[in-house]
Amino acid sequence: MKLNILGCYAATPRSLNNPTAQVLEIKNHLFLIDCGEGTQVQLRKNKVRFSRINHIFISHLHGDHFFGLPGLVSTFRLLGRKTPLHVYGPKGIKEALTLLLKLGDSWTNYPLLFHELTSSDSELIFEDDTVSVSTIPLQHRVYTNGFLFKEKPGLRQLNVAAAEKYRIDRCYYQNIKNGKDIRLDDNKLVPNAELTFDPPKPKSYAFCSDTAYTTSIVPLIKDVDVLYHEATFLETEKDLAPKTKHATAKEAASIAKAANVGKLILGHFSTRYKSIELFKEEAETIFSNVALADDGKEFDL
Amino acid sequence: MKLNILGCYAATPRSLNNPTAQVLEIKNHLFLIDCGEGTQVQLRKNKVRFSRINHIFISHLHGDHFFGLPGLVSTFRLLGRKTPLHVYGPKGIKEALTLLLKLGDSWTNYPLLFHELTSSDSELIFEDDTVSVSTIPLQHRVYTNGFLFKEKPGLRQLNVAAAEKYRIDRCYYQNIKNGKDIRLDDNKLVPNAELTFDPPKPKSYAFCSDTAYTTSIVPLIKDVDVLYHEATFLETEKDLAPKTKHATAKEAASIAKAANVGKLILGHFSTRYKSIELFKEEAETIFSNVALADDGKEFDL
């Protein structure tokens, strides 16, 4: 599981900071999470292959999380894309994209499939053999969801030495990986546990931005390996957090601690701060494993 | 008159190229012309003060000329703008912006005034004491206008030495600048021409992008000081020009020659070309005073 931060700064632009967008590589998928203005250029700069993106998850319809989507969708068309693109986001996202493409007389020549979200409860929105994605309802000024990405348990791993010891034919190996016990020619049953190792522990990633401090998300993100939680403000501006429905570094750390997550990544920093190091310092007074997002940074999780 | 090119490349993104946007400083105005994705960051990089922009002219509703506008309009709000913003562009631009701001529940707290264009004839769309702006109907895949910016003649310039020779009181100086003759105490009439110099020649700038080659624009841009004309393609791809309703460098130069303009600036280069030098070479076979636009380049006209 790899996370590539394309942008992690709050709304007002600066020369070198980008609004929210990140690419999560999980199993065989490359998921784009949020798409602030300039995301397509950030994808180029970070050498992400456009054709690998088939699913885009949009947390909410504020510009710094969303205004890069019309351009990216248009660029896919110019690049001759044929494969379907799935867009998950708040109700209204389809109307907005459709209108912009209509006005430019440039409807996509690939299937563009919208999955509009309206529920205030967590719901499963994507699932295949390897991964599931659920919403994490957040508290912000407009309807907003975080997203929980979970690997499914992989196949058990073959203990080749054990299988060879019992002289088991290779044609049974797939059955063993699938968890089956094996009956030998002498009718003895070898339990699967003797022939396999546990699969790697499935990993999970929770993206929570933008949101006010809310403990309602704790049960949903309990024990995730990695939590990305917004931290727009430091303690000096903590009064602004509830007013703007954003969180502080300490609040993000409290959520991480309550949910017993493995690692906390902070992002969505207000551009008022010259340096972001203080975010880490303040969060570490509450939770120990804290990392800072930054534009172009890659986390190998 | 100064022209700051924020971006001048065609649609598909590259790491270091920006889509169309430029800032024209003319008399006391700072006009933003087109607003491709990323324009607000380009404004920051080029140190343009956001508060000086009160008029934005959008040629057409393709993303590479327009998708930076929602973000810029939103940023103005976040920066606490109070002064009105005038947006001139094709019909539909109001519906698009309104929908995007409504979905983000972030309507501007400053007056946002749309001037929607529908005419296929040139029309005067802005005028004050110093400057006028008219549309230049272009031929593209969607409804598109170029824009003609014209300074108005300034006041005549006082010849102080001549005024002093005739011992004319200073209280008449403004009348002299306004073009009045002056009657002396001995009843002698001094004609205005003896007391003044001609004002500086009013300058003019024509922005023509995107467009196929069309001589219909020649009468509208006759004798302008500076013409910015799109040149998406070189001769090697000239077959693509009529199909995509774009122009080649040579076609842009033909228009410049027929219109007898002072200087031709080429832009809107396809990102397929590694170098843009050939655009200048090809245009110069037809018209001599050719310059190439480039992101961040400033022309002092």
Image (spheres, coloured by chain):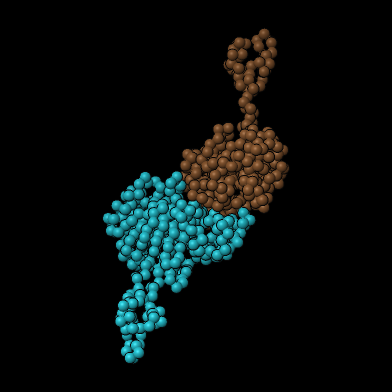
Chain colours: A brown, B cyan
Q: Where B267 falls versus B129 (above or below)?
A: above
Query: Which is nearer the eye, B285 or A247?
Result: A247
Judged left or right of residue B3, residue B194 is: left
Residue A117 visible? The answer is no
Residue at image coords 51%, 40%:
A296
Q: Where A260 falls versus A44 (above or below)?
A: above
Indicate the position of residue A251 as horizontal and vertical percent values. 67, 43
Indicate the position of residue B162 as horizontal and vertical percent values. 31, 79
Indicate the position of residue A143 as horizontal and vertical percent values. 66, 50
Query: Which is nearer the eye, B198 or B63?
Result: B198
Residue at image coords 37%, 46%:
B273
Q: Where B210 falls versus A60 (above or below)?
A: below
The quadrant of the image that shows the C terminus of chain B is bottom left
Residue B237 visible? The answer is yes
Indicate the position of residue A160 as horizontal and vertical percent values. 59, 16
Q: How many marks overall?
A: 0
Q: Residue furthest bottom?
A: B187
Residue at image coords 65%, 10%:
A185
The quadrant of the image that shows the N terminus of chain B is bottom left
Residue at image coords 54%, 44%:
A275
Task: Answer with the quarter of the image where residue B130 lies.
Answer: bottom left
Q: Where B18 falls versus B152 (above or below)?
A: above
Task: Answer with the quarter of the image where residue B94 lies.
Answer: bottom right
